Image (cartoon, rainbow, N blue to C red):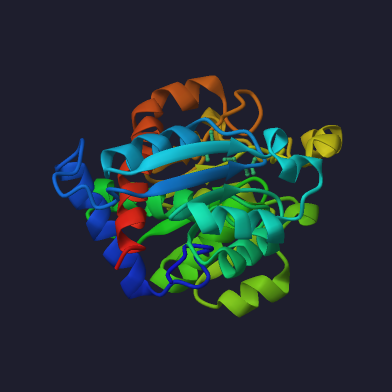
Amino acid sequence: MKHLLDIESLNAAQIADILARAAEMKRHRGPHPDAPLAGECWVMLFSKSSTRTRLSFEVGIRELGGQPIFLPASEIQLGRGEPIRDTARVIGRMAHGAVIRTYGQSEVEEFARLSGIRTINALTDAEHPCQILSDLFTITEKRGSLDGLKLAFIGDGDCNVARSWIWAASRCGFELRIAAPPRFQPPKELVQRAGGRISVTTDVRAACDGANVLYTDVWVSMGKEDEATFRAAQFGGYQINRATLDSISGSPLIMHCLPAYRGKEITDDVFEAHAKTIFDQTENRLHAQKAILTWLKK
Ligand code: CP
Ligand code: NVA
């Protein structure tokens, strides 16, 4: 039984396979002629809000011939305290796959183990693998390949998106520079374990200078709302704005996983100037996730 629980467990060949499938899905967009998920019901178990991930999976599963069933945690017994290990065994008796958005990485791992059905991590506090696979696809589309990629991540260097970038850099061998306040840098142990060409700094300009991609994410991830005031003070200097771009060499792609908070991690003018790239990223969630869904069937 195959799952997609994190980037950490993938190798370069598996990532390349998924990216090639994503390109194929995009070339032949729309309903898949072979309906590879025909007869399958996929539960989408979400404990956090979502626009892009929910929509792209619902559309993607349908385009592959399957049926998505959206189950918000707050509306099922899970939200009233039924444990994930029982929920997993219930869903495993009736559905063919599950897409899960939750807090703890251990929850998706436990679900995958006990449900016995294909399980996809649609974001946990630890990783957002579908986003980063999709972004790798966007980068290969725009640059031709990942060769020579220097990606700068600006903001919360210890969030799920940053951590998935760490594993992507480790597995694919590109250079990742993280600029983050000291309190929001990834643990040294994690960076060491990942290996590869990953640097962490407080110097935004140094991280961005000469990078091919500048990437940012919200300062306040879902579940961290009670830290919003503290985070706003910490992240003040970690914004992608016109001054950042004017101070560096090169014309990098500006990427954002969305949702975006203008005036916080990115200014409105920079966001709008790079909206084409950012919404290409969004669209590519659909193609990349269809690729993941077929890759899991192998
Ligand atoms: N980028 C992303 O995962 O967006 P949603 O939270 O809207 O799904
Ligand atoms: N780091 C963000 C990503 C949103 C897609 C969060 O977890 O809220």
Along the line of sight, which residue is nearer the eye, 26 or 66?
66
Which residue of the protein is positioned furthest toward the front in this rendering? 93
282 is higher (above) or lower (below) than 119: above
The residue under the point 55% across, 42% down is 216
Along the line of sight, which residue is nearer the eye, 139 or 201?
139
Query: Quarter holding the N terminus?
Result: bottom left
Could you tell me residue 228's position as x and y percent?
Answer: 81, 34
Could you tell me residue 14's position as x and y percent?
Answer: 34, 70
Q: Is residue 170 left or right of residue 24?
A: right
Along the line of sight, which residue is nearer the eye, 238 or 40?
40
The residue under the point 78% across, 56% down is 182
Residue 49, can we see it? yes
Could you tell me residue 76's position as x and y percent?
Answer: 69, 38
Q: Is residue 23 left or right of residue 93?
A: left
217 is higher (above) or lower (below) than 84: above
The residue under the point 66% across, 52% down is 159
* Tally of marks: 0
The residue under the point 40% across, 26% down is 275
Q: Is residue 212 left or right of residue 236?
A: left
Could you tell me residue 247's position as x and y percent?
Answer: 51, 39
Residue 148, can we see it? no
Query: Quarter holding the C terminus?
Result: bottom left
Where residue 235 sits, quadrant-wise, is: top right
